[in-house]
Amino acid sequence: MKHICNMYERDMHKLTQSLHGCASDLTIPFYTEVEIKEVNGLLKLQHIGKQFDGKDVLDDISFEVGTGEIISLLGPSGSGKTTLLNIILGLTAPDSGQIIWNEADVTQMPMGKRGFNIVFQDYALFPHLNAYENIIYGLRNKKGVVSEKEVREFIDLLELSPHLKKKIGELSGGQKQRVALARTLVMKPNILLLDEPLSALDGVIKESIKQRIQSIAREFKLTTVIVTHDPEEALTLSDKVLIIDQGKVSRFGTPGEIIHQPGNDFVKRFIINQLEIKRHNIFNLFGDQYA
């Protein structure tokens, strides 16, 4: 164990040599320029089912999402959305159905081989490391995954350069979220999974992170799957929304389709009513121009 720790400390020392100056002097010694292979990023779930203790948690879930699209899994607590996210990740095995990625069946493929990476709700950052060390942590044993230039681009995209030397306890909630995103992006995931990415953020910070998630999906053609319980968040962030009620698909479509064609009473009650209440509150505060 002592030998492993010494190796880790030596590698981290090499990786952070350049942090003594400004962030623009950042160098990553062992990374090389790599050629990125284009993939067909279509993700399909076909008739996914899952039971726990004999109870259906997911029942016949089917949908598909294209390259660079953002899909939100939306539903109340206990609807099955987090279980579905874990099935896509490979953390939980489905009892039935198939997961198709890039025209290949990955249903039985181990989580580590899928290349699907997740940002957890609590960020799961290492408090004893600074922001930069957290960002590059997963690259220690994956040389050649990403180039020095690309790491810099991710850091700049997420506006993290001024915060690289800070310990996690010194970062705000929005900064922690951006560090967690950067750590995931440098691993070049085939699919980005986000578990309640905005739930701990407020106001302007939440809107800023939403814009960055959208920019990342578009710029890097990165298929993104988000779990949320917030209808406004899902409908303003996503290209498509899968609404789950008691483990079943209640509605699947674009935000516009869901707003104008809710399709059933649950969607009207769970989504439309919430949005109308928010609109009413804003109207009461600001007047006709916000109605």
Image (cartoon, helix red, strand yellow):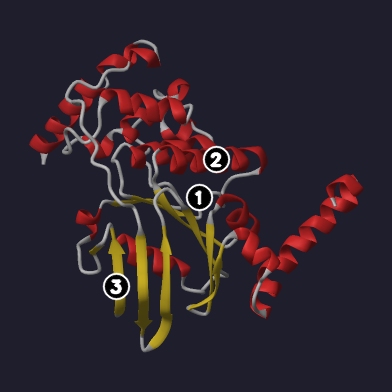
- Of marks 2 and 3, which one's residue comes earlier in the chain? 3
Viewer-proximal residue among 290 and 286: 290
x, y (%) of residue 284? Answer: 89, 52
Q: Is residue 261 left or right of residue 66?
A: right
Residue at 68% x, 79% y is 265
With respect to residue 24, does 191 lie above or below? below
Q: Which mark is residue 98?
A: 3
Residue at 31% x, 77% y is 97
Viewer-proximal residue among 71 and 85: 71
Classify mark 2: residues with Cα within 10 Å, few (<14), some (14-19) or many (20+). many
x, y (%) of residue 283? Answer: 87, 52
Q: Which mark is residue 197?
A: 1
Q: Secondary structure at mark 1?
A: loop
- Of marks 2 and 1, which one's residue comes earlier in the chain? 1
Q: CA distance from mark 3 to mark 1?
A: 26 Å
x, y (%) of residue 276? Answer: 78, 62
Classify mark 1: residues with Cα within 10 Å, few (<14), some (14-19) or many (20+). many
Q: Quadrant of residue 33?
A: top left
- Badge 3 amino acid: Gln
- Badge 1 amino acid: Pro
Q: Secondary structure at mark 3?
A: strand
With respect to residue 13, does 261 lie above or below? below
Which quadrant does the N terminus fall into? Answer: top left
Q: Which residue is mark 2?
A: 209
